[in-house]
Image (tube, rainbow, N blue to C red):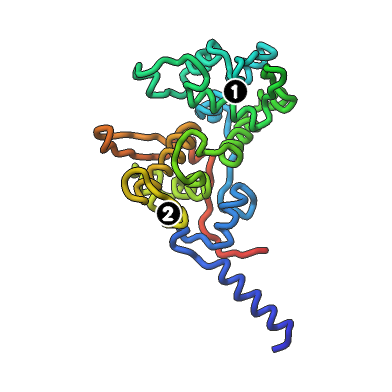
């Protein structure tokens, strides 16, 4: 065997290894998983982000929040922030009172909404707008950027930008104190695949967290849980970040909770919007460089 034939043989072996089905990855190959993790919506990834009709964009709570906020900034020209750099109380209450997303602490009467830092959803709206380059802060005032002015009325472009900012720029660990900052956000594309495959039937949240941890067991190595087992702690972290603060906020899942607070079970089912937005192809047994 000459060097040319040897190299062809090595390439064939490598291709076969990179294209083999991995049970822990739901049958996807190492090559495909590489793209799921690092190039989630690019052509070689099995996940396709589909265009939505305007009426479907309006079914997404986070889209509605950002769009309302941008329209509010546009109508005022600019909004003067507080001394600490937050939105003024009247603006915060106006945004929250639109009812796009409900926060239990306010709807139950446990707390009253006074300032931006009280509300996760309003604060997230402002942060996503800034991270997406839709708004800018200057001299203690917030206003639209040229990008914000340009795409605020284009629902499809605005949705894509918000969705990709949430998944690829904003840190999902920002609002919690879980030990590992990557759980859930790392491999979010794999979670989309799981929901696409199993989400038509109501499943417990730990059905998904177990599969996620099985695919990425390295997350268990550096955790010192403050309660329960390592698996329970990691699973709860995954569930909160993936379902409650990502998919629910974007209208991709319906969450049903049953039982008492400490022993409450959380059931997940994908929405019609999920299937309109996310298209997943199975392992295609094709390797390319």
Image quarter for residue 261? top left
Quadrant position of the N terminus in the picture? bottom right
Relative depth, front residue between 229 and 166: 229
Q: At which x and y percent is residue 214?
A: 41, 57
Label 2 neighbour load within 10 Å: few <14, some 14-19, many 20+: some
Res 212 label:
none
Disc 2 versus disc 1: nearer the observer: 2
Residue pictured at 36% horizontal, 43% vertical: 226
Above or below 47: residue 240: above
Q: Quadrant of the C terminus?
A: bottom right
Residue ID at (51%, 29%): 60
Closer to us: 271 or 226: 226
**265 or 113, which lies in front?**
113
Q: Position of residue 143 (x, y in %)?
A: 69, 19
Task: Give the secondary structure at mark 2.
Answer: helix
Q: Is residue 105 left or right of residue 82?
A: left
Q: Residue 40 vs residue 260: left or right? A: right
Note whether 37 is above or below 94 in the view shown: below
Q: Is residue 253 left or right of residue 68?
A: left
Residue pointed to by mark 1: 67
Q: CA distance from mark 2 to mark 1?
A: 38 Å
Neighbour class for label 1 at 10 Å: few (<14), some, many (≥20)?
A: many
Quadrant position of residue 140: top right
* Label 1 element class: helix
Q: Earlier in the sequence, mark 2 or mark 1?
A: 1
- Pick out the residue farthest to the bottom: 1
Residue at point 58%, 46% (across, down): 48
Q: Residue at x 44, y 41 (%)?
A: 178
Q: Is residue 189 visible to us here?
A: no
Which residue is under mark 2?
220
């Amino acid at each position: 065997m000459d060097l040319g034939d040897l190299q062809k043989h090595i390439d064939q072996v490598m291709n076969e290894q990179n294209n083999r089905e991995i049970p822990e990855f739901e049958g996807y190959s190492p090559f495909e998983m590489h793209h799921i993790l690092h190039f989630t919506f690019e052509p070689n990834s099995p996940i396709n982000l589909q265009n939505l009709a305007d009426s479907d964009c309006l079914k997404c709570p986070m889209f509605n929040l950002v769009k309302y906020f941008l329209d509010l900034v546009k109508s005022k020209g600019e909004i003067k922030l507080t001394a600490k750099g937050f939105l003024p109380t009247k603006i915060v209450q106006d945004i929250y009172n639109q009812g796009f997303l409900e926060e239990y602490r306010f709807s139950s009467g446990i707390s009253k909404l006074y300032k931006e830092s009280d509300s996760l959803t309003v604060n997230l709206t402002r942060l996503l707008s800034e991270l997406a380059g839709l708004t800018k802060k200057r001299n203690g005032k917030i206003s639209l950027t040229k990008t914000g002015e340009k795409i605020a009325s284009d629902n499809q472009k605005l949705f894509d930008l918000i969705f990709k900012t949430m998944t690829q720029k904003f840190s999902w660990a920002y609002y919690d104190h879980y030990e590992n900052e990557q759980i859930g956000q790392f491999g979010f594309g794999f979670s989309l695949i799981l929901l696409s495959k199993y989400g038509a039937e109501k499943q417990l949240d730990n059905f998904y967290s177990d599969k996620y941890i099985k695919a990425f067991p390295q997350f268990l190595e550096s955790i010192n849980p403050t309660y329960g087992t390592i698996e329970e702690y990691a699973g709860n972290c995954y569930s909160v970040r993936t379902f409650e603060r990502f998919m629910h906020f974007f209208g991709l899942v319906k969450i049903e909770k049953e039982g008492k607070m400490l022993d409450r079970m959380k059931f997940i089912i994908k929405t019609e919007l999920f299937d309109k937005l996310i298209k997943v192809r199975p392992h295609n047994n094709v390797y390319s460089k």
